[in-house]
């Protein structure tokens, strides 16, 4: 049986080699939204044990489908999904604003992600204060402490982005998390200035007239963009000065500008854009090197007449300015009874992933949102497990943060079915060994370290006991390498041969 399995595996590997082998380094993430209990917890008021079990089940499901990162919403609306002295506990945990849930959810999610060799990107909503103007808030909520910072718009509450005090406060909130938690990245989504409400101008004209900062009377929009620019610049500086290895990413709306408004824009006809309606100049943030990655939300189908997925993939890739680019996919739109024909097609999402892989420069995908992996997606989960994400992938390194490889594992040897090795501890945090990759190939088989089919496992341990095989034993070569926390890979060890 063992020999038959090995022959079948070699045959399948040979068949796949004729096609494109999945990348060894690729970002594969899912957003986990806590606002309105979209993804987790399923409802407010669950016990700590029930919340934790839901988190474990969700992470196991994401891992099963090949994910290597989670974008976890930790600050839905100036509240906290973690222990904070600055902001109250979120009502989405217990049903009561400010009530302790009995444990620290963010720490739990970090621990569980890292157990599964998954990154955790802490997702903040910077300017949102409350989902409704009449929403019950904890007594220590910032809206009560500093009402002069708050603007009501569209039935919701927002920070006034023009005030230096609000920018500094947001930076302090983020810095607090970066200091106290071992997060892999800080993540903002598309909400900067709110999406426009028809017939209701954003009420910041008084602030503009009082503090124009050199902008003329006809430059209100430029002034607003500068407010957001200053926030992003301050956040970038704060994060990098606190922990240089923590990444800073933005998931913007899918269109920067339409070409009708700017020759640099995309050939699209979007009703809203980052630049003109949300006052978020993503291209500038990349050019200034304030952010490490962008994950534009391309929540449209391939061939959309106004906002074509393929066209936008190419546009964002051409304008990434040397920063990492991942693509956001509308997992939630894939339904057999969708009103849009393209989203009734089982191959829509697989085609999108394949398309991103054809564009050099796009390094992965993120899916909105996690809960949808639990429902019928017309075979998409099977496509991930059996083909697209069949083999493990590592989040791509970022050379501008750290390009130094970690120390090669030492003294790699076998003892029966046990393989073990040692590593030297370096002086700096970025060079510290975080995980190991164990490779396996059959003796005589051509080995390629860039081919993920040879990865047996990724582990945080410096030893592994192989499961006892059944049937006739075969000779295998094993090699091990080290990964640092930015996913730079060391040189591989010399092979150890073992009958298994």
Image (cartoon, rainbow, N blue to C red):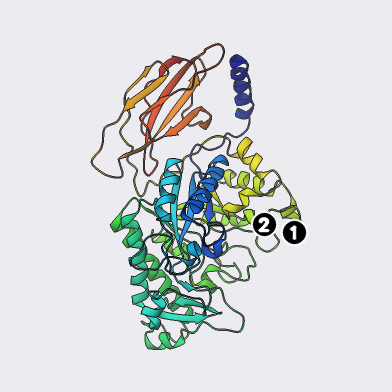
Up the image or down, 441 lies above or below 273; here it is above
Q: Quadrant of the N terminus?
A: top right
x and y percent of residue 294 in the render?
A: 48, 56
Toward the viewer: 155 or 80?
Answer: 80
Is residue 325 among the parts visible in the rendering? no
Toward the viewer: 192 or 363?
Answer: 192
Residue shown at 55% from the left, 34% from the top: 391
Up the image or down, 396 lies above or below 199; here it is above
Quadrant of residue 83 within the rendered picture: bottom left
Confirm or deny contact between disc 2 and disc 1 (CB under 8 A).
yes
Select label 2 or label 1 by which is in front.
2
**SS at circle 1:** loop
Q: Residue beneath label 2, please?
A: 333
Is residue 38 among the parts visible in the rendering? yes
Q: Residues within 10 Å of mark 1 (few under 14, many from 20)?
A: few
Toward the viewer: 291 or 127?
Answer: 127
Q: Horizontal placement of 171 versus 32: left or right? A: left
x and y percent of residue 471 in the render?
A: 57, 13
Single out the residue that lies furthest toward the top. Answer: 472
Residue shown at 33% from the left, 28% from the top: 409
Up the image or down, 4 lies above or below 279; here it is above
**SS at circle 2:** helix
Single out the residue that lies furthest toward the left. Answer: 427
x and y percent of residue 212 in the render?
A: 39, 84
Residue shown at 42% from the left, 55% from the top: 106
Q: Residue beneath label 1, please?
A: 340
Q: Horizontal placement of 76 versus 426: left or right? A: right
Q: Earlier in the sequence, mark 2 or mark 1?
A: 2
Q: CA distance from mark 2 to mark 1?
A: 9 Å
x and y percent of residue 428 in the render?
A: 25, 43
Q: Residues within 10 Å of mark 2 (few under 14, many from 20)?
A: many
């Amino acid at each position: 049986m063992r020999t038959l399995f090995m022959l079948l595996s070699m045959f399948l590997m040979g068949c796949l080699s004729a096609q494109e082998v999945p990348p060894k380094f690729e970002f594969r993430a899912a957003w986990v939204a806590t606002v309105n209990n979209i993804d987790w917890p399923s409802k407010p008021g669950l016990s700590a044990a029930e919340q934790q079990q839901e988190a474990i089940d969700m992470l196991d499901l994401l891992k099963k489908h090949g994910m290597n990162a989670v974008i976890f919403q930790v600050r839905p609306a100036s509240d906290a999904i973690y222990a904070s002295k600055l902001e109250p506990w979120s009502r989405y945990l217990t049903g009561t604003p400010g009530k302790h849930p009995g444990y620290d959810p963010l720490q739990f999610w970090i621990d569980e992600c890292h157990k599964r060799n998954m990154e955790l990107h802490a997702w903040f909503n910077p300017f949102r204060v409350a989902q409704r103007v009449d929403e019950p808030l904890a007594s220590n909520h910032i809206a009560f402490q500093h009402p002069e910072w708050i603007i009501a718009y569209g039935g919701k509450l927002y920070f006034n982005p023009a005030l230096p005090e609000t920018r500094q406060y947001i930076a302090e909130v983020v810095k607090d998390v970066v200091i106290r938690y071992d997060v892999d990245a800080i993540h903002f989504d598309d909400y900067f200035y709110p999406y426009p409400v028809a017939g209701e101008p954003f009420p910041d004209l008084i602030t503009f007239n009082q503090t124009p900062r050199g902008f003329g009377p006809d430059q209100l929009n430029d002034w607003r963009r500068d407010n957001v620019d200053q926030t992003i610049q301050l956040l970038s500086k704060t994060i990098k000065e606190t922990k240089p290895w923590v990444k800073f990413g933005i998931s913007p709306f899918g269109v920067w500008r339409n070409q009708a408004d700017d020759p640099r824009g995309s050939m699209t006809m979007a009703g809203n854009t980052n630049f003109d309606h949300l006052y978020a100049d993503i291209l500038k943030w990349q050019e200034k090197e304030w952010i490490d990655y962008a994950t534009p939300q391309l929540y449209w189908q391939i061939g959309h007449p106004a906002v074509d997925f393929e066209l936008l993939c190419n546009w964002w890739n051409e304008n990434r300015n040397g920063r990492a680019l991942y693509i956001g996919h509308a997992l939630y739109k894939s339904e057999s009874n969708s009103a849009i024909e393209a989203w009734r097609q089982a191959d829509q999402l697989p085609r999108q992933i394949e398309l991103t892989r054809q564009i050099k420069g796009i390094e992965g995908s993120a899916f909105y949102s996690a809960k949808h992996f639990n429902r019928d997606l017309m075979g998409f989960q099977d496509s991930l497990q059996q083909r697209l994400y069949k083999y493990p992938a590592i989040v791509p390194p970022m050379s501008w943060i750290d390009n130094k490889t970690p120390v090669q594992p030492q003294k790699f040897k076998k003892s029966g079915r046990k393989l073990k090795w040692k590593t030297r501890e370096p002086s700096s945090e970025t060079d510290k060994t975080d995980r190991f990759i164990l490779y396996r190939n059959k003796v005589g088989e051509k080995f390629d370290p860039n081919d993920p089919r040879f990865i047996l496992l990724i582990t945080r341990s410096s030893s592994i006991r192989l499961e006892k095989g059944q049937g006739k034993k075969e000779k295998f070569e094993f090699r091990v390498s080290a990964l640092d926390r930015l996913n730079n890979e060391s040189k591989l060890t010399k092979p150890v041969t073992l009958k298994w």
